Amino acid sequence: MKKHALVNLVSACLLAMPFVNSVAAEEEINIYSARKEALIKPLLDQFSEETGITINLVTGKDDALLQKLKLEGENTPADLLFTADAGRLHRAKEASLTQTIESEVLEANIPAKLRDPDWQWVGLTYRARPIMYAKDRVEPDDLSTYEALVEPKWQGRICVRSSGNIYNQSLLASMIAADGLEKTEQWAEGLVENFARPPAGGDTDQIKAVAAGECDIAIANTYYLARLAKSADEGEQAIADKVAVFWPNQGEDERGTHINVSGAALTQNAANKDNALQLLEYMTNDDAQAWYSDVNGEYPVKPGVEVSDVLKSWGAFKSDELNLSELGKNNADALKAMDKAGWK
């Protein structure tokens, strides 16, 4: 059997496995998470140590976990769904896989734009998707907005990952909300014309390409640069040192830089609802939010929590005030715009 086929088979089997001891235990929470284990498990372990509540964690790809929830229906053991994009959380809501979250703590801790208006999901952290540029080849005064990236001066100078990436889809979804579909389609066509190379790799690869001189600017999520800057690998630190962050759309009449969340939804058939809500509240307290910033390079959703030194070094910025539920609503149009533009 080929290696990639074996990996796919093993992954499918893992997703098909039930939780161990998932039936009827009073003090437990069952989580399906599209976030990598290393990004959340230390916090989950700390919660378990403090509360005595056992957490059973299954990780997998976003779409696979959504399909798993659909297939399991009312028999699912899952109490919470964690994922890394508002668009995917919206898909869970549209598929009737979620239920209303009721919590005064979460209402106080999470700004309205970072949660579903119907309380079907909440953001737990957020990240920005700004422009990142080569310090030695680009003057920040040459940059201004996302829309300006289609100018001829950027021809052959831009790196960005594929249209299949949900982060890019959500960026375009936000632009549709701000500029309309027709203008966004035109923007996508102009951006493709300015690509330095066909899209390939993840956000870290785009940042590395800028540092290596393959392109001069990239669009990428902030936490990828934070990880390189905080890496114990001197080579990765050197890459981060060659790249700077530019916050687009900061003018008085402009909408601000695009942001997105990692978040959670309470599943429609959650058997451990009270415990699940307790965990969500815990994950938005000051210490947990500061941990996310220090360790994962993400921004706290709770106002007033201090961010890490790396994030501070990039300066403050104005973020888009769009309610992030709009990212999911505009996802289909965003995909059409990218396909029309030939964004592979």
Image (spheres, rainbow, N blue to C red):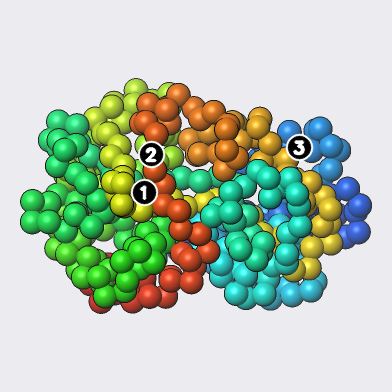
Q: How far separated are the C-alphas under marks 1 and 2?
A: 7 Å
Residue occupied by mark 1 = 257
What's the amino acid at mark 1?
Thr
CA gap, disc 3 and disc 1: 33 Å
Q: Amino acid at mark 3?
A: Phe
Quadrant where the C terminus lies?
bottom left
Please report the residue visible at 79 percent of the width from the left and 38 percent of the height from the top: 48
- The answer to whether one can see residue 34 in this image is no
**What is the secondary structure assignment of the residue under circle 2?**
loop
Residue at 78%, 68% in the rendered image: 269
Please identify the quarter of the rendering in which residue 342 is found.
bottom left
Could you say where residue 2 lies in the image, as x and y percent from the top left? 45, 63
SS assignment at label 3 = helix
State which mark lies toward you, 3 or 1: 1
Confirm or deny contact between disc 2 and disc 3 (CB under 8 A). Answer: no
User: As drawn, which residue projects farthest toward the left?
Assistant: 152
Which of the two labelled residues, at mark 2 and mark 3, occupies the earlier sequence position?
Answer: 3
Q: Amino acid at mark 2?
A: Phe
Spot occupied by residue 267 in the image (x, y as percentages of width and height) = 72, 64
Q: Which residue is mark 3?
A: 47
**In the image: residue 292, left or right of residue 326:** right
Q: Which x, y percent locates residue 157?
A: 14, 49
The residue labelled by disc 2 is 317
Classify mark 2: residues with Cα within 10 Å, few (<14), some (14-19) or many (20+).
Answer: some
How far from the left and from the top, in percent, is residue 297?
Answer: 48, 35
